[in-house]
Image (cartoon, helix red, strand yellow):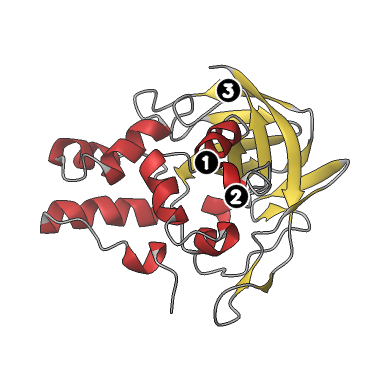
Amino acid sequence: MQAFSVREVRVGCAQSFGPKGQPSAIDKQAVPGRVMATVTGLAGDEQGDTRRHGGPDKAIHVYPAAHYPRWRGEMPELGARLRPGGFGENLVVDGVTEGQVCLGDRFRLGGALVEVSQGRQPCWKLNLRFGRPDMARLVQATGRSGWYFRVLAPGEIGAGDGAELETRPNPEWTLAKAWELLYRDRLNREELAAFAALGGLPAGWRRLAEARLASGRTENWSARLETPA
C-alpha cells in the first residue's frame, strides 16, 4: 500500500460529556480549507482528557471510511450515528485500513510528514457516544479502531490530500498484527518481546508489553472500557 486519501478533516472543542460532566472533544466537525498539523495536533482541535488523549504520540486520530458501512450493516438502528466523524476522528480516510499500515510508517500527507504511532485503544466514551454500553468492547474486539499519527514535520492538511508512503521500518508489524497480539494472542512471549523492542513504540505500549512479559498476565481493561457509574 503506497497511498491513501483524506476525505474529511475534523476538529472539536472540549465539552461536558460524561456521567459526571467529564469533558470530551469527541464531537468533531468537518472543517473547510486547509488545517495546520503540528506536533501537538490540528489547529483548533482540543482534547477533554489530556492525560489520556492528545500529545505527540496521539496528535491526529485517523479512521477508515471503509469501516462505516460494516458498522451500519451490523447496527442499522445506529445508522444515523455511524457516519464519518462518528468515532471522533480528525481524519476520515479512503483507501486504507489497519491491515495496510504498519507501526512506524511515515507518510507525506499534504504539507506535513506524519508517522503511525499506535492503534487507538477505545474507551467508555464510545459507549455514551453511541448509546450502547458495550460499544468500546465491540470496537476493540473487531479491531476497527483507527490509529494515531505523530507529526514529524508540521504542515497543512486538507480534504482531498493524498498520502504517499516514504518509509516503512516495520513491514511485519501492521496495526492488525499489533491488535492480534494485544487482544487475542495476548501472552505470546516471543511476539511481546519483539513488539517491546520496536523503535518508536509509544512508552505506554512498551510498558504494557513488558508488564505482560514480567507477570504472565493481561492487564485489566475494565476502567477503560466500562462506563463509570
The answer to whether residue 150 of the structure is visible from this angle is no
Which one is in front in this view, the residue at disc 1 or the one at disc 3? 1
Q: Residues within 10 Å of mark 1 (few under 14, many from 20)?
A: many
The residue positioned farthest toward the right in the image shown: 33
Q: Position of residue 78 (x, y in %)?
A: 60, 48
Q: Earlier in the sequence, mark 2 or mark 3?
A: 2
Residue identifier under label 3? 166
Q: On the image, numbered disc 2 is attached to which residue?
A: 87
* 2 and 1 marks in contact (CB < 8 Å): yes
Is residue 67 found left or right of 27 in the rendered image?
A: left
Q: Amino acid at mark 1?
A: Gly
Q: Is residue 194 left or right of residue 125?
A: left
Q: Are marks 2 and 3 in contact (CB under 8 Å)?
A: no
Q: What residue would you read off at disc 1?
A: 146
Mark before the other along the chain sequence, 2 or 1: 2
Q: Position of residue 162 (x, y in %)?
A: 72, 24
Q: Residue at x 36, y 69 (%)?
A: 223
Marks 1 and 3, Cα distance to the nearest angstrom?
Answer: 20 Å
Count of marks, rendered view:
3
Could you classify mark 3 by the number of other residues whose Cα lies within 10 Å: few (under 14), some (14-19), or many (20 or more)?
some
Upstream in the sequence, badge 1 or badge 3? Answer: 1
Q: Secondary structure at mark 3?
A: strand
